[in-house]
Image (tube, coloured by chain):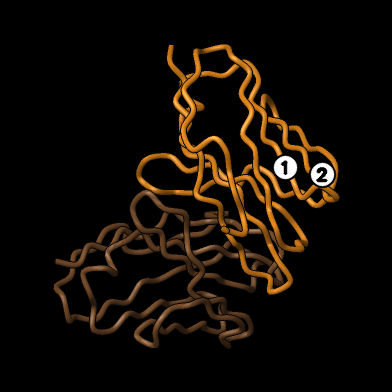
Chain colours: A orange, B brown
């Protein structure tokens, strides 16, 4: 079993829809990261969370430490949101362990 | 602030050759981590450098080595390249290992 599990693996939505991507982890962590990767490779850090909820524009990230679960929500989705969204955790060793990513496609 | 910069962006090498990839961290960051991302997979941790020393290492063979310079920039060296080393190599910088800012990556193709 992977230490970081994401779901779904692939997600197709219509423009304007509310999107949720889930992440579960099995290890103790000091922080959880939500990352965005566009074709071509570069990774952008969206959020770093250790508790509660963070919001940035149309993006919202939540984490439940007791349940070892986090969600990334996108409101009013747009085709430019199409990307791979990756959940990663920082464990005691201060290295990132990544989920396998969620490929999001938002259709116009 | 240029953020994290990596060079080169793309590279083609022949099996058996050696390659050096470079990373300049975000201004103020002192820790550099390297990751390998094979096509269609999540990044895998290679190693992390802090204060010019390798602080942690993932499950990669000794063919993968690195260095951190006094200005915190870092190099990743891979010797005796294999076809399976073809991947996107990502560098991430942080302050003391907390947080992560990523570069655009170096796409290495081994033929």
Residue bearing mark 1: A70
- Which chain does tag 2 point to? A
User: Which disc, if any, is residue A29?
Assistant: none
Q: Which mark is residue A64?
A: 2
Query: Crowding near pointer 2: few (<14 within 10 Å), some, many (20+)?
Result: some
**Measured along the vertical axis of the image, is residue A74 above or below residue B44?**
above
What's the distance in space between the residues labelled 2 and 1, CA to CA?
6 Å
B79 vs A12, left or right, is left
Front position in the image: B57 or B1: B57
Q: Earlier in the sequence, mark 2 or mark 1?
A: 2
Location of the C terminus of chain B (image quadrant): bottom left
Front position in the image: A28 or A36: A28
Residue A26 screen position, x and y as percent: 70, 58
Task: Tell me which corner region of the image, top left, top right, bottom left or bottom right, holds residue A75.
Answer: top right
Secondary structure found at label 1: strand
Query: Is residue B69 positioned above or below B29 on the image?
Result: below
Q: Position of residue B32 (x, y in %)?
A: 56, 71
User: Whole-percent x and y of residue A89?
Assistant: 66, 57
Q: Chain of mark 1?
A: A
The quarter of the picture where the N terminus of chain B appears is bottom right
Q: Nearer the viewer, residue B41 or A82?
A: B41
The quarter of the picture where residue A56 lies is top right
Say above or below: A60 vs B3: above
Residue at left 27%, top 58%? Answer: B10
Residue at 46% in and 33% down: A10
Would you say A10 lies left or right of A46 here?
left
Q: Residue at the location (28% across, 84% down)?
A: B79
Could you tell me which residue is drawn at 36 percent across and 72 percent down?
Answer: B21
């Amino acid at each position: 079993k992977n230490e970081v599990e994401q779901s779904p693996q692939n997600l197709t939505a219509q423009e304007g829809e509310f999107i949720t991507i889930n992440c579960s982890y099995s290890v103790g962590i000091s922080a959880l990261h939500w990352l965005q990767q566009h074709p071509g490779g570069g990774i952008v850090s969206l959020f770093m969370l250790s508790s509660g909820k963070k919001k940035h524009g149309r993006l919202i990230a939540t984490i439940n430490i007791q349940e070892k679960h986090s969600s990334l929500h996108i409101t009013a989705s747009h085709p430019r949101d199409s990307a791979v969204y990756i959940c990663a955790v920082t464990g005691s060793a201060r290295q990132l362990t990544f989920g396998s990513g969620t490929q999001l496609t938002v259709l116009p | 602030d240029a953020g994290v910069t990596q060079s080169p962006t793309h590279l083609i090498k022949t099996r058996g050759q050696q390659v050096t990839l470079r990373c300049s961290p975000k201004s103020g960051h002192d820790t550099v981590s390297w990751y390998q991302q094979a096509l269609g997979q999540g990044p895998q941790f290679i190693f992390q450098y802090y204060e010019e020393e390798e602080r942690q290492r993932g499950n990669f063979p000794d063919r993968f080595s690195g260095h951190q310079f006094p200005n915190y920039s870092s190099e990743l060296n891979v010797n005796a390249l294999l076809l399976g080393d073809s991947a996107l190599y990502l560098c991430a910088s942080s302050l003391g290992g907390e947080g992560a800012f990523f570069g655009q990556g170096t796409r290495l193709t081994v033929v």
